[in-house]
Image: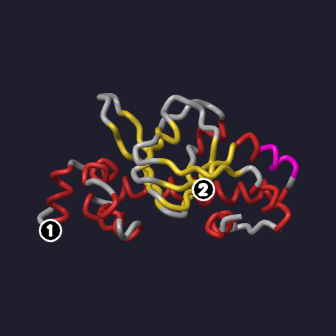
Amino acid sequence: MNASLLQLIQVGNPLPEPLLQEMSAHFQLMELPKGYYLHRQGRVCQHLWFMLQGAVRYFHLNEEGKEVNVWFSFDTDIISDAPSVVTQKPSLESIQLLEDSVLYALDYAQLKSMMQQHHLIALWYIQLVEHYYVAQIEERIGDLQFLNARQRYEKLLIQFPNITNRLSLGHMASYLHITPETLSRIRSGKG
């Protein structure tokens, strides 16, 4: 098993070697180009992706048909549309690669089967969802409610130190719920 993938899987509730080996048989290595859609809004998400290298954005189209970025993931992160995976209902978001990326895909049906067979894999998955979805979404909601635009930008730079080298100002502004012009003023110290 790839050492980086192993490290990503072992975050939180470590799994014993036999279960890791069983799980690894279900991972599919993917090397995909910038712009590729891992998942499209309106479809049921069927995978979890374990990203070794790259960048993705989660976004949806608002009422005016404009793209609104809601989250970013970078190297060594786990990617999925958790609400769609868990409910098996169509997704409200799309997931698109922002850089050439290297990922491992895990089919949710296979994961669910392993969870039914192995209590430890089910516990691992619960902790994964708590860490990568529940905690992040609660923090994001709080940020939008209680932080002003400058504070959200500063927090974004702390969370993702090299984000300005990897994303366009338009993507960052959309995520921060501000215009690109406002972001430019904040970055220049005038906002």
Classify mark 2: helix, strand or loop: strand
**Against 70, is 155 above or below?**
below
Which sits in the foreground, 28 or 142? 28
Assess disc 2: are there few (<14), some (14-19) or many (≥20) residues with their C-alpha within 10 Å of its C-alpha: many
- Which circle's residue, 2 or 1, is located before the other in the chain? 2
Q: Residue at x 17, y 54 (%)?
A: 182
Kindly report the distance in space between the C-alpha atoms of the residues bearing marks 2 and 1: 37 Å
Q: Which residue is mark 2?
A: 50
Q: Position of residue 54 (x, y in %)?
A: 46, 58
Q: Residue at x 50, y 53 (%)?
A: 137
2 and 1 marks in contact (CB < 8 Å): no
Image quarter in which the N terminus is found: bottom right
Looking at the rendered structure, the kind of residue marked 2 is Phe
In the image, the segment drawn in magenta is 112-117
Which sits in the foreground, 37 or 10? 37
**Against 84, is 153 above or below?**
below
Q: Quadrant of residue 50?
A: bottom right
Q: Which mark is residue 189?
A: 1
Q: Name, please, the residue furthest toward the left.
A: 190
